[in-house]
Image: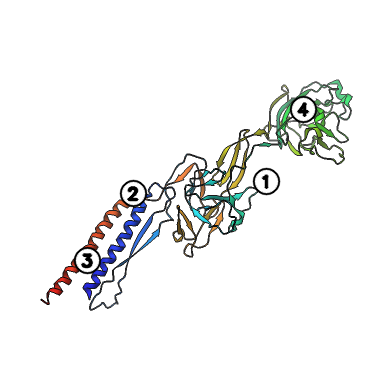
Amino acid sequence: MSINSALAAGASGLVANSSALAAISDNIANVNTVGYKRVETVFTPNYKIRGGGEIRYASSGVASNSRLDVNSAGLLNPGSSPTDMAIDGAGFFVVRPTPSNASGADAVLFTRSGSFETDNEGFLRNDAGQYLFAWPVQADGSVSLNPSNLNELEAVNLSNIGGTAQATSSVRINANLQASQAISPAAATYAAGASATNMASGGVTPDFQRTIQVYDTQGGVRSITLSLLKSTTANQWHAELHVVPASDVTTGAGLIDGQIATGVLAFNTDGEIDAAASTLPTTLSFLGSNNVAALGATDVQWAAATGVGSQSITLDLGASGSPGGMTQFDSPSTLNSTVADGAIFGAFAGVEVSTDGFISARFTNGVVRQIYQIPVATVFNPNGLASTGGASFQVTDDSGAFTLNAPGLGASGTISSATLENSNVDIATEFADLIITQRAYSASSRIITTADEMLNEAIQMKR
């Protein structure tokens, strides 16, 4: 009977709008929840009518289907910590409920909730208690990027970061040598391989001398002196690099008095350095203090008493046509600057996160070292993900498989540090939907009341 079907239709309207009310209630309650994705209720009619119409119509009611609006991003607002992170664009953070994954079967979850803080063990964990996973940066600075292998990821832990020192690997010297410098009488008999006639020993007074500080592998300060003596050959200078004190190094044949390199600096007629004619080595290699092999000619080793490791230093003296470096102009000899990298020991001072997802440790000595890179996971259909609570999701057949990319590559968004993503709930829209749902619920109840009255009339016909 059509009246009975009308009762069922009214009841289905009550159920459907009750479901819509529940979804709206969640949306309003989570309007300030970081990374929350609103629930949308979609109504579907249940009627089945042939193209030619029906002689008698029976109500089928309505069905409701709740789905997540994951694809819509919330507004990005400033956070209070460098580890507050948001994804600017498509994609999700990869998180797990435990940091160790000892069983190998812990759930892999995806979230936009980036309010990460360190727990008592140093792991980065968000407000829902989920641990952030990322690719570790190897000692050589490389990252093993794999789009699907979760075993390459590990829980981000900041407690394992101790202090660090950084050995010097490059030195740039910016200086001018006076072209009209008078030639010293010692230049006629100068010989780098004899203490009586070289500059490292003090046997010959250099025309120009400056000391450069570098850092060894333990962050210790070592002094390297550059000594220059104008040659009897036009536009050439005898050059020696030697360590002070000389006892800091042990050298092979051809080097004495702490020397680590000898040769000639040559200049062209324009006063710029002539690299082709210069013979002073531009790479200074130091063997570690624990080296026990015999030293070859011109080999240099840190003395055993120093206890430091091997290192190589690139000496940048400039190039013809480039600004800076070594020059020979007719103005007083002067050292304009020396630029050496490296640093003394520094304690861990905090972290910073770049847009390409690198988490870098910052130390008190100014060194910044990359330790992790955060992947961004993407799926073909974000709205097909299944919610698991805590603003996190799992892949389903509807969502498609996930892909891990470095931030900013492919379809992946970039990382915004000290930023949080708000929920994608629009409070005005929710209140408008709340009014509509309330009216629809009331209307459905009126269907039941009216059908009841009509049934009552039918029953009264018997009397």
Q: Quick one: 267 or 360, which is closer to the camera?
A: 360
Label 4 residue SS: strand
Q: Amino acid at mark 2?
A: Ile
Give the camera-side residue of 19 and 211: 19
Q: Looking at the image, what colour scheme do you see?
A: rainbow
The residue where tag 2 is placed is: 427
Do callouts 3 and 1 mark residues in contact (Cβ within 8 Å)? no
Q: Amino acid at mark 3?
A: Ile
Q: Is residue 409 left or right of residue 341?
A: left
User: Which residue is located at x 88 percent, y 30 percent?
Assistant: 193
The residue that disc 4 covers is 225
- Does dot 1 land on a helix, a strand or a loop? loop
Give the mark, 3 or 4, whose residue is nearer the N terminus. Answer: 4
Q: Compare marks 1 and 4 and give the one earlier in the sequence.
A: 1
Q: Is residue 88 left or right of residue 41?
A: right
Q: Amino acid at mark 4?
A: Thr
Total count of labels = 4
Residue 59 place in picture, x, y as percent: 26, 72
User: What residue is disc 3 on?
Assistant: 448
Kindly state the secondary structure of the residue where label 2 is placed: helix
> Residue 216's image quarter?
top right
Q: Give the percent coordinates (x, y) of residue 451.
A: 19, 69
Q: CA distance from mark 1 to mark 4?
A: 32 Å
Image disc number at residue 139: 1
Give the mark nearest the N terminus, 1 or 2.
Answer: 1
Amino acid identity at mark 1: Ala
Task: Report, in whole angstroms, how far the alpha carbon at label 1 lies from the one at label 2.
Answer: 49 Å
Discs 4, 2 touching: Cβ within 8 Å: no
- Report the mark closest to the observer, 4 or 2: 2
- Residue 455, placed above or below residue 105: below
